[in-house]
Image (cartoon, rainbow, N blue to C red):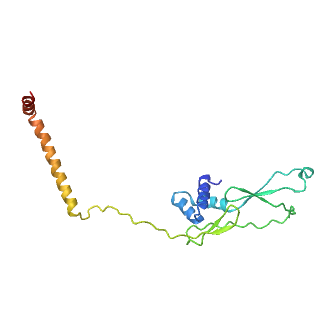
Amino acid sequence: MVNEEILGGLRLALERGESMKKAMMTFLNSGYKREEIEEAAKALTEPVAEARPQMPAAMRGPAGPVEQRVSAYGTQIPIAPKEEPQIQAKALPEKKPQPVEIYSQPQAQQRVSVYGEQKPVVQQPAFYPVQRVSVYGGERDATEKAIIFILFFLLAFLIGLLILIFIFKQQLIDFFSRFFT
């Protein structure tokens, strides 16, 4: 059973132009199991053919049964009807699916449109602006030191004033009551 979260995420990444390998690495780094990621990638890259229910030959008309192919983006693409091949008694040897290699160098990226044609995608070099990060314990310039010094003494003065107000509370009440009456 294919994990629908991984399948949907891979589909969205491909629609945005990301490479399959980069999208798979993202899921691997997110903590998903490698087997689940490879299974979802395999389900996404292999075309799924589904046949419509067959009607009797009298009702079918001249067109015959129509097969549809589901593209990687979930749209159905009709395929021209073919003659049904004869079933052979000899079994074909099974091919083992090749595991998708996640840890390889990026290759030229191809973008597949909904209609099946491939469009080359030119990768732009990534530009990341330099961010200024504060350095703790670094040297401060003179203005920063002066501001810190002034704020420290202002805090000490206000704390001292608060202590004096509590100590001389009654005297302050008497002073202001005589002053305003």
The quadrant where residue 90 appears:
bottom right
Q: x, y (%) of residue 4? A: 62, 52
The quadrant where residue 105 appears:
bottom right
- Viewer-proximal residue among 7 and 92: 7
Total numbered labels: 0
Residue in the image at 55% along x and 65% along y: 22
Left or right of 47 on screen, residue 159? left
Q: Is residue 41 visible?
A: yes
Q: x, y (%) of residue 112? A: 66, 65
- Viewer-proximal residue among 34 and 79: 79
Left or right of 41 on screen, residue 57? right
Q: x, y (%) of residue 178? A: 6, 29
The quarter of the image holding the C terminus is top left
Residue in the image at 58% along x and 66% along y: 21
Left or right of 124 on screen, residue 131? left
Left or right of 129 on screen, residue 73? right
